[in-house]
Image (spheres, grey):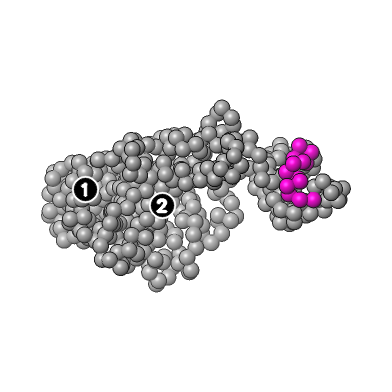
């Protein structure tokens, strides 16, 4: 039973077993959501070396520890007959399978939907790919590919310089939609008793983000310019330089915000100006208002402006960097950063799942697994004895050394 770490209450997905055949971000992020919610997620990695994500560098160096906590790790050689047989035995005990390999890979490994559904008719099988069903469905895709393909990169960068977003937002979004589909399919199974095929995709996830711009073009009859050149819906919605050579974003998006701004900074003249009474009027007067705001905000430090905006209830945000998040008081409240072990053994703090569900603690239960760390444990649960496990390891079918099994991987 999966319990809250500090309570005797089962987590929401307690009793649900998920077998994950995933790499990089999209699939593992889906598994992470389900694991954090209490599912028993068993990550199946290729034997003997494990998920190639473990060995990525640069921008991708943090992928594995970010998306693989609260999972058990099993290493199988799925290219072998014995490895496929073990996978099939494991899947017969599962509620859900998730995978994000290239189209056709799972079928070649004997673990495609049609094969597994015959073994386990109650199985929910979620495939996370580049594209849903259609003319593109067999194309390879990446987060960055679909950001360009669906117009998000065009909207993000300045004109003529399309730019991907600064995090793998589409991979994570696609994985989250996969988890959403799985939860709906589990509810459907409660009624029908049957499993089904679920699919989420990068391209369609990006198109869903672009929906607001698609609708905007229809409403306005105009092409939507990139965000840096957009015609804003509000007069003040900008990044401003501060007196201490830093930056802060400030948004004045309502008449109440405007009144508070004018009064706090002693600009009754702006508040009394009949040409600036409504948001629509202020948007038309942006060329006049923005230089005034630039001068006002440029005379204060970032800390001073943050305190003022907090006091008067105006939306604001200092322009933060990644390193600033480790000490953010909001993220550190109530354990929202969980202690996580990096591949070299270093401990750090990473964000937990960004939801609150009653009194459940959706925090850390397991560190990201080492390669094959729980193979022996999981195979024993399937009724396979130590002698057979040792034999399989000797043949290279699994990674399940006694050291990995004995070490454990607790919090």
Residue at x 76% of width, y 46% of height: 281
Task: Tell me where residue 103 sits by quadrant.
Answer: top left
The residue at the far top in this view is 160
* Residue 282 lies in the magenta stretch: yes
Q: Which mark is residue 111?
A: 1
Vertical side of 5 occupied by 70: above or below: above
Q: Which residue is mark 2?
A: 177
Dominant SS of magenta comes to helix
Residue at x 49% of width, y 59% of height: 355
Q: Are marks 2 and 1 in contact (CB under 8 Å)?
A: no
In the rendered image, residue 243, in percent from the top left (x then y), is placed at 75, 39
Left/right placement of residue 301 relative to residue 13 reads right
Crowding around mark 2 (Cα neighbors within 10 Å: few <14, some 14 to 19, many 20+) is many
Left/right placement of residue 267 relative to residue 82 reads right
Task: Tell me where residue 366 sits by quadrant.
Answer: bottom left
Cα separation between marks 2 and 1: 22 Å
- Comparing 234 with 347, the one in front is 234
């Amino acid at each position: 039973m999966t319990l809250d770490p500090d309570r005797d209450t089962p987590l929401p997905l307690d009793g649900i077993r998920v077998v994950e055949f995933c790499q990089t971000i999209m699939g593992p992020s889906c598994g992470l959501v389900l694991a954090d919610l209490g599912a028993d997620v068993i990550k199946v990695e290729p034997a003997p070396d494990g998920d190639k994500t473990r060995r990525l560098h640069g921008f991708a160096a943090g992928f594995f520890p970010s998306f693989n906590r609260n999972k058990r790790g099993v290493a199988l050689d799925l290219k072998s007959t014995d490895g496929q047989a073990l996978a099939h035995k494991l899947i017969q005990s599962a509620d859900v399978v998730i995978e994000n390999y290239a189209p056709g890979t799972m079928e070649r490994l004997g673990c495609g939907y049609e094969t597994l559904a015959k073994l386990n008719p109650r199985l929910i099988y979620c495939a996370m790919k580049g594209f849903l069903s259609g003319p593109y469905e067999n194309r390879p895709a990446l987060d960055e590919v679909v950001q360009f393909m669906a117009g998000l990169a065009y909207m993000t960068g300045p004109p003529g310089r399309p730019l991907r977003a600064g995090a793998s937002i589409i991979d994570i979004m696609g994985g989250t939609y996969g988890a959403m589909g799985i939860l709906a399919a589990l509810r459907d199974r409660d009624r029908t008793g049957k499993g089904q095929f679920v699919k989420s995709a990068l391209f369609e996830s990006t198109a869903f983000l672009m929906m607001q711009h698609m609708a905007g073009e229809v409403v306005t009859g105009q092409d939507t310019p990139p965000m840096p050149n957009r015609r804003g819906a509000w007069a003040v919605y900008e990044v401003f330089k501060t007196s201490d050579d830093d930056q802060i974003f400030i948004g004045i998006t309502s008449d109440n915000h405007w009144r508070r701004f004018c009064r706090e900074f002693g600009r009754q003249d702006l508040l009394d100006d009949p040409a600036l009474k409504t948001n629509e009027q202020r948007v038309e007067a942006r060329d006049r208002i923005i230089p005034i705001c630039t001068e006002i905000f440029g005379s204060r430090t970032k800390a001073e402006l943050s305190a003022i905006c907090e006091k008067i209830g105006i939306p604001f945000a200092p322009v933060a960097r990644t390193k600033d998040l480790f000490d953010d008081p909001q993220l550190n409240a109530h354990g929202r950063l969980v202690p996580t072990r990096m591949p070299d053994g270093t401990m750090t703090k990473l964000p937990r799942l960004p939801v609150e569900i009653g009194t459940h603690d959706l925090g850390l239960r397991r560190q990201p697994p080492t390669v094959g760390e729980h193979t022996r444990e999981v195979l024993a649960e399937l009724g396979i004895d130590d002698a057979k496990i040792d034999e399989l390891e000797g043949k290279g079918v699994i990674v399940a050394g006694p050291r990995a099994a004995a070490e454990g991987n607790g919090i």
